[in-house]
Amino acid sequence: MFFGSDSLKYKKLLRVRMLCLAVAVLLLAGCGAENQDQTVPDFSIAYVKRPVPTEVDQDTNETIPVDPDVREATDFNEGGDVYLRERASISAAERNITLCITDIDDDGVGTGDVRDLETSYDGTKLIFSLRLEDLTNGNDVPKWNLYEYDTEVGGCPTRVIADDFAAAKGDDVAPHYLPDGRIVFSSNASVTTRESLLNEGKSQFSPFDEDLREPAVVLHVMNADGTDIKQISFNQSHDLDASVLSSGEIIFSRWDGARARSAIRLYTIHPDGTELKALYGLHDADVGTDGSTVQFLDPRELNDGRVLTMLKPFNGSAGGGAPVAINVADYADINQPTVPNLGMLAGPGQVLAINQDVRTDDSISPAGRYRSVYPLADGSNRALVSWSQCRLHLTDSEGLRIPDAAPTPCPSVIPTDAVEAFPLYGIYVYDFAQDTQLPVLIPEENIIIDEPVVLAPRPRPAVLVDKVVGLELDQALAEEEFVGILHIRSVYDFDGNFNALSTLDNMNNPVTTLAEMANPTRTGADQRNARYLRIVKATAIPDRRDAATEFDAGVAFGAGGRRGGMREIIGYATIEPDGSVMTKVPANVPLSIQVVDKDGRRIGGRHLNWIQVRGGETLECNGCHTHSVAAPALPVPHGYNDAPTALNIGAELTVPDWTFPGTSTDDPMTLTVDETIFPQDGETMAQARIRVSCTNASGVFLKTAAGCPELSPSPDPVFFDVWAKASPISDDISLRYSELDVAMAAGIPATAQCIPGAVAGAKWDFTCRTIINYEDSIHPLWSLPRTDFATGMLDRTCTSCHSNQDVANANAPMVPMAQLDLSDGLRGNDNDPERFKSYQELFVRDRVQWQLAGGVLMPVTEEVQARDPVTNELLFETMVDPVTGEIVQVIDPVTMLPIPIMVTRNVPAEEAPSMRVRGAAASSRFFNRFTTTGVGTVEHMGLLTPAELRLLYEWLDIGAQYFNNTFDAPPP
């Protein structure tokens, strides 16, 4: 803040600086008008103009600018229009080309909004997204639609999707022309996801992002005339800012919104939805100013192959950021080279494109703020930028903005208590080589001028032809079963390094190589920790406030919270001795995977990046990836074609008999299909087993469900030890849902039609889901009748001990054993009124410890000294001194010490929560009692069956949600 004589001096200094700036801008404008070809080639430019959005600060009652959030992909700010200038000149006249659409009152004022300008490769067309003002008070909010303007035709822009019904399905933003003439764009219409919801027996809706802010916009492709719309990405949060690399691949910004790793990184994908890959920034987002966290936005390829990207925080920077040039060919993170360059390059993989003090944190940026950048394709190493000068608001002694005071340029040293002025974005051309910036469009107060593009010809990238069903994509899998295939070469391959997952061999020695792991003679099936692959699908979350899909989010998500999302289990597949897996998975849905042990517990953490396959596509991964950072190095790049050489090279023809060493294929042993598994060169064990098992008598390899049931996942963990030379282990049927008590039949989370053998004709298909809701599938376990495993006489039902009522004594009150109450009933308090109390008891430490007093349950209390709620200081009794009138402490006449103020409080339970939402392995306090003898004061070993434990394991491993289907959850 500035006041007094120093303030007057400062104001004079700033007036001088502002005068100098105005003169400089005029001089630059004159130079540009006289020799325009030295500034920007003689082509038309288009840009967006809109008022600076404002709001009233509830604390100070000031009018302040609204700080945009990059996660709000469909945010609307009234008053935005597209303007066109025939030449990139300050003196050139501008035309509002969208007023014909946004001026719905015909008063010469546009009340819509526009965004995401892009041009065609020949420079004749402009495409963008436009939304009209809502005149329905929220009852029928207009959608963002794509519009195209043809400079050779003129007139009013036309909507790309002409059909009203199709255009109203969702918000369409961020369009970009593909080199074959089609258009890629982001939309929450989610046309394929809606079809999947119908197949799952749900109503159609646009799924919300993982923050539950708004419906997620994901990538779609359509013809130039707006027909044949196809969804090509299936992220659970936004996929934005698509553009096309010279290779023909689409590069875009993906918001990985899962839990604490929420960040926006760069990905690539083919226009047909195949070959989705993480490209850059997956492990290190703290690359902004002073290590601040930033997001990678609006990527565009430069002439030299680098990618120009805007670094911005989620919010807090007035919409500004820093343009950086990224060497994506050689780096996966700022200091992490790609695999071929490991040990040869040290970084950095990105450099600031603007050689100025541009900040990306929440502090004032001395060199101003850059809102957008558009590289020129003329080989001049320049770009059009939207830039706002660093300016301050004059403030009074209270630090409040002085009304009507003119903003002033920032001094060389910005005071720590300075208040940033409203942004003043204009259009400039920036020369990266010369580090100079010349004005093209002078800024206007209270107006944002943004997203400049040049309507000039530019090189057309290569065309990536869509993969064809029946050629590159399996026809039966794509058109009949709607699935793809996932092939993992080895779950023991962690970025090219062997990870035994704590496995010991038959002699109880650590397994140190993949060859040792893959040899059943050395490491038998019971010794291998990894037995199954669990395939998990994200549950689509609808608008909880819409009457058709409403649900109580506070109840539904459980202890993991909303960011934990909801999950469905697709099924389980067998992991072979070499760690390979080959299984069908549903096409066009967001999937993740978990490695599971023989009892059904997840090994390691959750997979927090969504994968997808197109129908008929085979997605092959070398193995697993670790995101943990071993300082000072970053994790190895998360790559595909450029990933580390696969640890599992598969069978080698040079090996005698072409067999897998130590397996049954060493002998003429036959399998259930009466065929010996002789692998082909390079095949993993999974490939070899599936090929042999699914090849018919005519030598035809069948992949359909009828011809190859082994390729389908199963709702139950199913294991066949086909590789052991002698004494193969049998499949452990005790884990199957069919082994649950008959009283649990209604709570089995998988439908019988999906469990082979459960009913006639049952088989897995692409619609099968295992949906575990606590009330239906978990809570009934606590009241199932159980008897002592030794005598068979004693009642060992969970709620016979873990209840607040003694069922053996006419339901008289009793203290729940270990203060854990698993009996029926709702929690019944303001914090959690609708959940069963048993759920809360399992995950939250009790704030009250109960005792039985006179036949009544009473809280255990204690007397403690009170503390100040603000300072946390201990409180003592006080009085007014009769002489001085001051407040003084009361002194005990016996002890001569201040008298403390005592309060009565409930004593919390000593026991920690029994379960953790992090998974089964993190819930050992609960499970150790049932799997290990002698744990705790009461023996629990064997009280839960393997099938019951498996159900609990998988529920915890996917997040321990209270509901995993919003349509089962209660309304608000």
Image: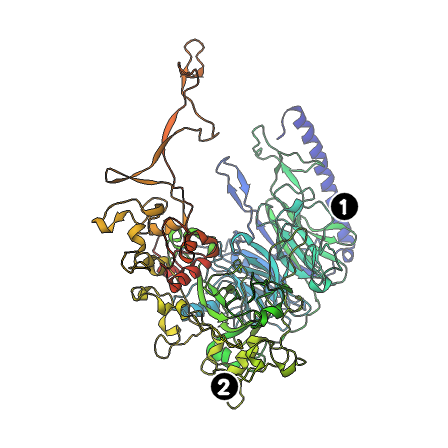
Front-most of residues 287 and 225: 287
Amino acid type of disc 1?
A: Leu
Q: Quadrant of the N terminus?
A: top right
Front-most of residues 325 and 373: 325
Q: Secondary structure at mark 1?
A: helix
Q: Which residue is mark 2?
A: 674
Answer few, some or many: residues within 10 Å of disc 2's Cα (few below 14, many 20 plus, some between 14 and 19). Answer: few
Whether residue 137 is visible here, answered yes or no, is no
| In this view, 603 is above or below 616 | above
Whether residue 38 is visible here, answered yes or no, is yes
Q: Secondary structure at mark 2?
A: loop
* CB within 8 Å, label 1 to label 2: no
Indicate the quadrant where residue 221 lies: bottom right
Which mark, residue 27?
Answer: 1
Task: Name the residue at the top extreme.
Answer: 883
Indicate the quadrant where residue 647 lies: bottom right
| In this view, 140 is above or below 738 | above
Q: Position of residue 354 (x, y in %)?
A: 72, 50
- Judge from the rendering whether residue 789 lies leftward or rightward of residue 537; answer left or right: left
- Structural distance between the alpha carbons of marks 1 and 2: 88 Å
Task: Name the residue at the left extreme.
Answer: 810
Observer-side mark, 1 or 2, equals 2
Answer few, some or many: residues within 10 Å of disc 1's Cα (few below 14, many 20 plus, some between 14 and 19). Answer: few
Indicate the quadrant where residue 739 lies: bottom left
Amino acid type of disc 2?
A: Asp
Q: Position of residue 250 (x, y in %)?
A: 62, 66
Q: Position of residue 582 (x, y in %)?
A: 53, 74
- Residue pictured at 68% horizontal, 30% vertical: 10
Q: Position of residue 380 (x, y in %)?
A: 77, 59
- Residue pictured at 47% horizontal, 27% vertical: 873
Tag 2 or tag 1, which sits nearer the N-term?
Answer: 1
- Judge from the rendering whether residue 200 lies leftward or rightward of residue 425; answer left or right: left
